Amino acid sequence: MRSILEIYLLILRLLSTIVLMKSKVMNQTTTISISRWMGRTFPLLALTAMGLLASCRNEATSEPVQTRTAQEATASYREGDIDFPLAADFNITFNEETESTLRGISATVSPTLNAKGRHGITLPNELSVLCIIRSSGNDEPTYYEAKAVKTTNGYHIEKERIKLRSGSALAPGKKWYIMIAMGGTYDKDAGQMRFGASGPEAAPVATSAGRVMDIPAVSHWMEMPTYPNGHPKWPKDWSQAEKQRKLEVFPQGVLCRATLRLDDAYKQRLGSGQVALTVNRLRIVSTSLSFAGYFSLAKNDLPAIDFKSKTETVRGGANNGNLMKWVPTQHAATKKEFTALNASTPEYEKIFTGDVFSLQGGSSAKIFSDTSVGADVKRNVAPGIPTILFWAIPTTTAGTNLSTTLIAETGTSSNARILEPKHTYIYGKKHPKQVLSGKSVYFDAVYYNPYTPLDYMAEYNVKRKNPDQFRDKGLIPQGTTNQLDTEHGVNSFAMMTAADAEQVNLMSNGRNYKSPTPAQWASVIPFQEPARVNTGGGDVNTATVNVTLGTISGATKYSSRRKGAVVYAIALTDLGGTNKYRVAYRYERVANPQAPTVKHPYLSITYTNSGRSMNSRFSVTPDDTWELYERIAFQVDAIHLGAHFVGGVDDIANEAFWKDASLRQERRILPTHYTSYEARGWGAFVTLGFRAASFYFTGDHTKVAVCNGAYNWAQGTFVDPRFYQVLRFSCRPFTTEEHP
């Protein structure tokens, strides 16, 4: 017998459909079913009378081929017909009840649900199919490309000539198998089935017309009936059981659906207004999914012959559910979004541009996360909520550092109450386990980008009253100006008593500001142990800090890292049972060009035991001391992270994060007192020089915010409340009102 035999593949008719498979996605079970379409039932796609390596004689025979001579055997295989009828219409459902296979084709997927609660798929007029034939020996597989053309009766593959790969041979005891692969691009020379592309691409908007996607898929191996000599049986000799066998097709990768909606808080923020919100650049960053590469068709990278008999855990081990080896070809992102997840774990990114998401409407529109949307956005999507569909392939390189994040990089907003997208985390998920092929994954992205807590803190201190009187023989001011300063200079030290500071009540940019509480102050700068900000101190891990943000109060978690003379922190974690207020802080001692450039004398104030000033004027201290202050201040920068940030404090504790121009940052500067004084009375004696701490009023004499040299903050506690009559305070007011 010749070692290389010319054979022909006869696939007569596939009478049944793809058998549905069940699986779980991120601890949820989802369905992609191919069974009913608009009330019609289609037959299962199965291999039933498939003649592989059939006899070439005009007459069919069940006689074992080994009884013939070698010459006869050489000429005994004729060209067969491939009859490949596929169901013309399918549907995909995204409910959580069952899971099945999705055919690997370039199909148009509908984003809306039909009457059966399913998403529809429309197949193209032609399907590309790669047939793979192998033996039970160590022979190289044979690859056979075909086109399936839509007809009135389904899809038909015309008969084509097939040859075994060189080195293959029919032999006693050998078994023969066939599988099919669909989707992607077959590279014959490289032996690869390529999928996806690197770089930005047009937004995959799922409009009412649907979304065209390339979905790779492969089947399991089907054993072909043979005679004992390894030659194939003619189909008429197949048993009834052999004719009824089904060829299952398994998707390679995951079907991803992302929705975008607004958070409840924006409903109140909008009021009676309207907003047109767009996202025109969406970046997907993932350690568990990749977006471009190839499936290796090498012999050792194909599915095991017996993979169907193995458990899902075993099948999904080395290749994360991919039945063939997946090799990402895109370069990992050079600028890692989350460095702390693992420095050696590659982050793959996909960028969509154009009209990615568009939200239109007001507070009554069904684009908010309230009851009008429905509790289960995975089962159904309310009108007005944008949807995109895309395909991705699980990787094997993430280890336990599994995450996927959707970032709205750029966009527009027609209403100032809804901030425009600017590196906004609209979805973030640390996966408890790797996503496996054949799953459906849902990204319920919520757009919530509020101002940071710095927005509730006034930009400047309360301005000192009668600044021309802060000199020898000058009148000692009483009360408060109820005005904000316009810079961070010497007049930012109002030099108010506690009683004066308590009277602070002013309007600025349409909002009312008052002197702060300790909890308001701690929302920006924790000053109590163990979380106090110290640019010369150590790290803080999940310390409890009580804060007030607007009208919301509660205990939160605070973590910080010191790098050199800079402290980085993540604050407001788990405020009110949510992380949507979570914020990143950067604290630093900085130069202040607005600080005074001339020396100032010590000013003296003397009190009686009643707390009233014995004289109404300042006096220079006896030693006539004059001092020039360091021109420094304490600076706070903030970036909103929100509920969908998947990183930790180590991910923001670096200058690269803070120098990213795409991030929206807010800043506040807190100057030191820049004025020296001494105060005497009832036995108390306070001297405040240029090396002394600055006292910021917080309304509680047991919780005074004390800034030491613009390096660190601490809590000042004064058991005797009369110290409030002697000490002089700076005041940085806060508001409880939302940004107009």
Image (cartoon, rainbow, N blue to C red):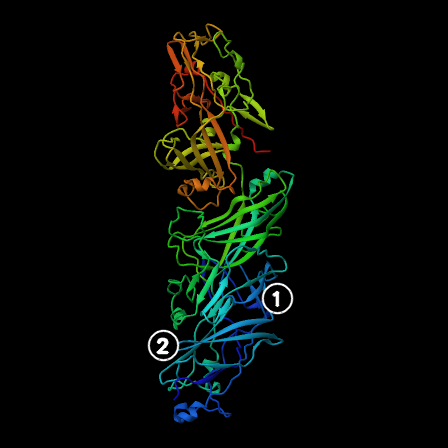
The local secondary structure at tag 2 comes to loop
- Position of residue 459 measured from the top left corner of the image (x, y, whole percent): 53, 28
Q: Which mark is residue 51?
A: none
Q: Which mark is residue 38?
A: 1
- Residue under label 2: 138
Where does the C terminus fall, quadrant-wise? top right
- Position of residue 249 measured from the top left corner of the image (x, y, whole percent): 48, 70
Classify residue 564 by image quadrant.
top left
Question: Relative to residue 573, is residue 395 depicted above or below?
Answer: below
Where does the N terminus fall, quadrant-wise? bottom left
- Amino acid under disc 1: Met
Image point (40%, 17%), residue name: 689
* Label 2 vs 1, first from the N-terminus: 1
Mark 2 against mark 1, which lies toward the viewer? 2
Question: Of all residues shown, which one is farthest toward the left?
Answer: 538
Please indicate whether residue 272 sits to the left or right of residue 2 in the image: right
Image point (56%, 66%), residue name: 106
Asked whether the viewer can see residue 135, the reply is: yes
Question: Relative to residue 203, is residue 133 depicted above or below?
Answer: below
